[in-house]
Image: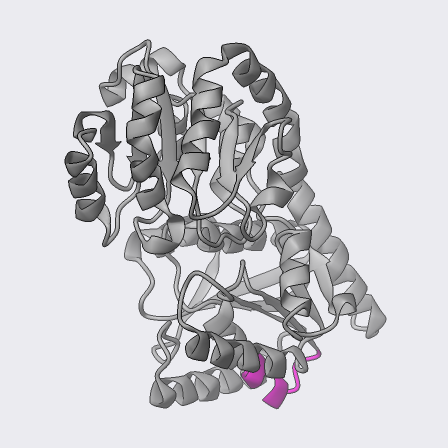
Amino acid sequence: MIPVMHVITRLTMGGSSENTVSMVEQLERFGYASTLVLGPQSEGPTVKAARRRGCRIVALDGLVREVSPARDLTAVAQLYRLFRRARPTIVHTHTSKAGFVGRLAAQLARVPVVVHQPHGHIFYGYWGRARTATFVALERIAAHWTDAMIALTPREIEEHVERGIGRASQYAVVPSGVPTQALREMAPSRTAARARLGLPRDAYVVAGVGRFVPIKGFDLLVAALPALVERVPETHVLLVGDGAEREALQARAAVLGVADRLHVSGTVSDVVGVLAAADVLAAPSRNEGMGRVLVEAMALGLPVVGTRVGGIADVILDGECGLVVPPEDPPALAEALIDLGLDVARRAKFAEAARPRAEAFSTSVAAELMRALYDRLVQSRGLGA
């Protein structure tokens, strides 16, 4: 077995955490004995679930998500000591913050192979120019300590290289793997899912799934709702998740006179049971690495509508399994959803194409791509088991 250490600041309910835990599971089968190193801001239930799935976990109190010079130096020191003691063949860092401190510690500890996986990026949609420029500068530095960087989609590579972060030859595309077949097997019928959620059987249901934070753009979906209801009167929007914007989203729907058409379920562990109730998934994000929920929805045969940001357009084949619209454009978002609400035949055609498209992002495909990358890196350095 080849020892690997994955480093992430926190495990929470979300795409990057699920992708990390799933990949640790898969790589174990290929002879890569992985340990997951995480910080104190992780969510207890998510960590417990990872342990149940067989993850070996090491917690470091210095590894926090926010920039904190004192704790960041502590994290580097803790990681350095851990790497020197455990002597991993590969250190694989996840997300920007863990990526910098983890790669620095790996460089100091002379770890043979260093891999970084941003799980998207923060180049737009998050902060102002000055803070963004600082993070880009740090990414440029850390790229020099990295043997391979993993992008979720081809567009992510382009957006990094455009900003001078590493060379194109350093990157490999490995999607966030989704267990497509398992999702289909556990999905309830649409009738049962709607009954459980209290939705009308004949409604046109648009789902949105994710954290209620500005980057996810659910305010744009709420803004599009009046026009959507006017043209497709049976419309209901179902938002699945939680976050700081929850009350603001509900208040805005009330001001727009569509509060009765907006349903907020809160965070759920069974996303499949909610998606099964929908006709369409909307992802109006301002930035998105890949959009794991897009693949989950497509695996269940849902057409998807997303914005042209990050890797979304690499996932959605525009006009085949869904529609891609400009970002920050509620009228365009409304028109796309109206089109699918009124044209049942087109919706069915998209649904039929969605299932095979989802397979390009399945867990098995992602695991084989990661295995091939690991094998190549290890063999090129003569470090085989």
Query: Is residue 352 shown above or below 145?
Result: above
The residue positioned 23% from the left and 30% from the top of the image is 263
The spot of residue 166 in percent (x, y) is 69, 74
The residue positioned 57% from the left and 62% from the top of the image is 34
What is the basis of the colouring in this image? one colour
Q: Quarter of the image containing the C terminus?
A: bottom right
Where residue 364 sits, quadrant-wise, is: top right
The spot of residue 123 in percent (x, y) is 51, 66
- Magenta residues span 102-112
Query: Is residue 244 shown above or below 85?
Result: above
Residue 187 highlighted magenta (yes or no): no
The residue positioned 37% from the left and 88% from the top of the image is 69
Is residue 60 in sight in this rendering?
Answer: yes
Residue 378 located left or right of residue 79 = right
The spot of residue 88 in percent (x, y) is 62, 74
Q: Quarter of the image containing the N terminus?
A: bottom right
Residue 136 located left or right of residue 215 = right
